[in-house]
Image (cartoon, grey):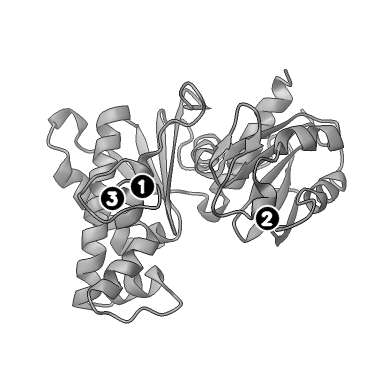
């Protein structure tokens, strides 16, 4: 199989990697600020053209997007120049190779399943906890997308009566258990939180600060409830937590305890909950796996 290109378009940075079959580490790596205006695919196309002999391109970016048509919809984390763009189609036209687009959380799940902590496990549930909460499920080695490709949006399936979420509902995991939520809860409890946001609160909690600890416990408990619901729904063989918040050992441990406390049906006890193996690279390895699938069946 020809090498494939993986593109991870983030809210601030875009990363591109070249992967050869059978090699774990990328052969080439490029990184630059995500374009915000004009022809936003120009720099990405140019970077991809410099990669030798690629057979396909896999692209991940923040949702919402339509994976079936390869079109970005209106993601709040990307500038309006991206909205409505036929990313997969445009790249196919410019590069002359198959291209596919998926949302970053689904690719995190696929990357961990194909190349990370979910190897040989099925199903694999991936949950990224950072400024927001993204989730993806891989069943039988493929992203479970549902009828339209949007399935498993657990970050916006409410678990409490909590505050209103940007999606319009109340008490979503994203509005009570994300990094943004941890920082907000700490401020509401009277703590000063600087530019470090949730990281400051997590570090203070780990260092013995009682108020910070209570905030982190509350958010981990809420996440635990969402994860327990997902365990009931999908019976995953492993749950992998990615994103900046999950890098905290304390948060991970509290979330594990919360899941065990929430799971009262004995059949579901003891589900494995671990930190994602690929860290910040889960998504780009997912884009790699997506490209490898497109190269194998260009259809
Ligand atoms: Zn929501």
Mark drawn on residue 223: 3
Instruction: Please give left or right for residue 238 compared with residue 44 in the image.
Output: left
Where on the picture, by quarter, is residue 221?
A: bottom left
Q: Position of residue 173 (x, y in %)?
A: 31, 49
Which mark is first along the chain, 3 or 2? Answer: 2
Q: Which residue is mark 2?
A: 14
Other residues around mark 1 within 10 Å, as few (<14) / some (14–19) / many (≥20): few
Residue 248 seen in this snapshot: no
Q: Residue at x 73, y 26 (%)?
A: 295
Q: Residue at x 24, y 67 (%)?
A: 215
Mark drawn on residue 168: 1
Mark 2 lies on a secondary structure that is: strand
Q: Is residue 107 above or below residue 210?
A: above
The quarter of the picture where the N terminus appears is top right
Other residues around mark 3 within 10 Å, as few (<14) / some (14–19) / many (≥20): many
Mark 3 vs ligand 1: CB below 8 Å: no
Where on the picture, by quarter, is residue 103?
A: top right
Instruction: Please give left or right for residue 9 compared with residue 136 in the image.
Output: right
Other residues around mark 2 within 10 Å, as few (<14) / some (14–19) / many (≥20): some
* Marks 2 and 1, how far apart at CA: 29 Å
Foreground disc of the pair 3, 1: 1
């Amino acid at each position: 199989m020809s090498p494939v290109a993986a593109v991870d378009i983030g809210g601030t940075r875009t990363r591109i990697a070249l992967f050869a079959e059978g090699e774990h580490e990328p052969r080439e790596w490029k990184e630059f600020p995500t374009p915000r205006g004009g022809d936003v695919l120009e720099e990405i196309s140019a970077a991809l053209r410099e990669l030798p002999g690629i057979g396909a391109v896999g692209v991940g970016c923040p949702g919402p997007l339509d994976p079936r048509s390869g079109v970005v919809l209106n993601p709040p984390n990307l500038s309006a120049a991206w909205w409505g763009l036929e990313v997969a189609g445009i790249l196919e036209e410019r590069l002359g190779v198959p291209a596919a687009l998926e949302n970053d959380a689904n690719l995190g799940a696929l990357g961990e399943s194909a190349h990370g902590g979910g190897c040989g496990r099925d199903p694999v549930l991936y949950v990224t906890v950072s400024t927001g909460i993204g989730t993806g499920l891989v069943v039988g080695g493929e992203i479970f997308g549902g009828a339209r490709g949007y399935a498993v949006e657990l970050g916006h399936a409410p678990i409490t009566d909590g505050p209103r979420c940007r999606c319009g509902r109340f008490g979503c995991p994203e509005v009570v258990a994300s990094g943004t939520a941890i920082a907000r809860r700490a401020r509401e409890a009277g703590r000063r939180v600087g530019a470090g946001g949730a990281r400051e609160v997590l570090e203070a909690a780990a260092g013995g600060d009682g108020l910070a600890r209570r905030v982190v416990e509350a958010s981990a408990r809420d996440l635990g409830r969402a994860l327990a619901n997902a365990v009931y729904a999908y019976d995953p063989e492993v749950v992998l937590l990615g994103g900046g918040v999950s890098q905290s050992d304390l948060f991970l441990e509290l979330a594990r305890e919360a899941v065990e406390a929430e799971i009262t049906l004995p059949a579901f006890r003891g589900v494995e909950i671990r930190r994602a193996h690929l860290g910040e690279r889960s998504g780009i390895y997912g884009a790699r796996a997506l490209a490898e699938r497109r190269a194998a069946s260009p259809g």
